[in-house]
Amino acid sequence: MDAPENAVAAEIAACSKCGLERREAKKFCPRCGFPYASVFKQPVSTLQSLEPAIKTTAALFGVNLILLFLKIAPKSIHLHIGILTVLLFDSIVLFAVYPIRSKIRFLGRRFFNAYFPPWKMISLALLTAVGIQFYFEAVERLGVPMLDYFEKSDVGTFKALWVFISAVLLAPVFEEIYFRGYLFQKFRLVLKPKENVLLQGLVFGIIHLSPATYISHTMLGILFGYFRYRTKSLLPGILCHALWNLSVLGVEYWRLTMK
């Protein structure tokens, strides 16, 4: 039977010495004792290759629905359930990433390379930030409600500390590992680099479930995806993601304390 027209190479396990394919969940070859290594042999359809990514993204979409509910629900349930929900988000990411952890190169072997100098990365980041700022101004003038991270009464409390931990320390790492690591690796099997960068950025924007930030987060997702493509590393995206979230929290804190 011929392989489908849009078939791609699927990753299976085989012995790194004799090539014996894995039939059971074993770390070492029962024939020669060598460790198994991932090889590309079996042709599968596009849908089959993306099925794990689709299921995981749907699960993360559901977790973000819970987070959205928490932001509009009574404040009394925010903190405790909110912490559990963020931990659930991170757990789903780790569960999805674990089987291909060796392929993602979590932080990458390089930060910048000769083909993508730091000054270009900084200029692109600043240009994107300016564009997003204009977008926020337009959204605010149109009266579209924006979801705040915390309220004035939260300043100086554990909730404010948790918002900092989750937004500046946890989110940049886990979201970059998933979107620019796991999802990027899945999409690259069936998409061209430009399509990959655009699609993962679009998914990143939509999954945040806030109409006011669809465009801004899509722009950020595309920027971080481009950094990932050009530098072969997750570090630039993690750093820029953390700095962006920190600046958003800083502006919000300044507005609350200056009123």
Image (cartoon, grey):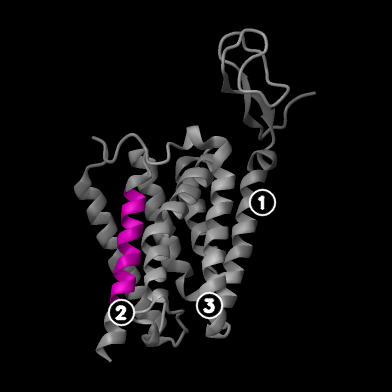
Image location of residue 217, percent across then percent down: 43, 64
Measured in 3D between alpha carbons, the distance from the residue under mark 1 to the one under mark 2, in whole angstroms, is 37 Å
Image location of residue 231, percent across then percent down: 33, 40
Instruction: Name the residue carrying label 3.
Output: 78
Q: Which mark is residue 55?
A: 1
Residue at 40 percent of width and 61 percent of height: 219
Residue at 69 percent of width and 36 percent of height: 45
In front here: 161 or 107? 161
In front here: 249 or 215? 249
Image location of residue 232, percent across then percent down: 37, 38
Instruction: Name the residue carrying label 2.
Output: 253
10 Å crowding of disc 1: few (<14), some (14-19), many (20+): few
Q: Nearer the viewer, mark 3 or mark 1?
A: 3
Measured in 3D between alpha carbons, the distance from the residue under mark 2 to the one under mark 3, in whole angstroms, is 19 Å
**Residue 186 counted in the magenta span:** no
CB under 8 Å between callouts 3 and 1?
no
Measured in 3D between alpha carbons, the distance from the residue under mark 3 to the one under mark 1, in whole angstroms, is 27 Å
- Stretch of the chain drawn in magenta: 236-252
